[in-house]
Amino acid sequence: MAGHTGVAGTTHLDAVHRVIGRPGIILVAEGAPHRVKSLLAQEKKRTARVAGTMPIYDVVVGNEEGQVPLAKLQRHLMKLPRNINRQEMESMEARLAALGSRAAAMPKGPMPAGAKMRSVQRTVRRR
């Protein structure tokens, strides 16, 4: 599999990662199923605009029914059929990089001296 990118996220630390590999584009979601579903659908729609005919798979990581346990994620991804070759994979990676990401990104550069990770911890506690 080629590199992955965090492409969407919420303040509740749900996230959607985009992986480009031989099967095509794989969206891997983690977090509460009811919150992740809309995030996944939204990202699938954004990606489909650029993907054209390339297959898009979506995987939800978790221990409930219909989800893939984290320990078995790699095995699950490796079992997917090989639909594209390396050249297609690389060109798609470049096209999707242009889409950018809407994940909760950290600001570039050094952390300001007064800034602490308090706000991140507060959102985790709120869950």
Image (cartoon, grey):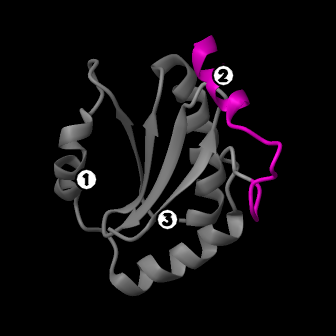
Residue most extreme to the bottom: 87
Q: Where residue 64 sits in the image (x, y, percent)?
A: 28, 18
CB contact under 8 Å: marks 2 and 1: no
Q: Examine the structure image and report whether residue 118 is included in the region drawn in magenta.
A: yes
Crowding near the residue tagged with mark 2, few <14, some 14–19, many ≥20 C-alpha atoms within 10 Å: few
Quickly name the residue at label 1.
77
Amino acid type assigned to the residue bearing label 1 in the image: Leu
Quarter of the image where one finds residue 101: bottom right
Q: Mark 1 or mark 3, which is nearer the start of the sequence?
A: 3
Residue lying at 35% horizontally and 67% vertically, measured from the top left: 21
Amino acid type assigned to the residue bearing label 2 in the image: Thr
Whether residue 80 is situated above or below residue 104 in the rendered picture: below
Residue lying at 68% horizontally and 44% vertically, measured from the top left: 104
Whether residue 3 is situated above or below residue 115 in the rendered picture: below
Real-space CA distance between mark 2 and mark 1, rounded to the nearest whole angstrom: 31 Å
Whether residue 27 is situated above or below residue 119 in the rendered picture: below
Eye-nearest disc, 3 or 1? 1
Q: Which residues are magenta?
A: 107-127
In front here: 39 or 108?
A: 108
Quickly name the residue at label 3.
53
Quarter of the image where one finds residue 117: top right
Q: Mark 2 or mark 3, which is nearer the start of the sequence?
A: 3
In front here: 75 or 89?
A: 75
Quickly name the residue at label 2.
123
Left or right: residue 30 versus residue 76 is right
Residue most extreme to the front: 113
Say which quadrant the C terminus sits in: top right
Helix, strand or loop for disc 3: loop
Real-space CA distance between mark 3 and mark 1, rounded to the nearest whole angstrom: 20 Å
Residue lying at 19% horizontally and 58% vertically, measured from the top left: 78
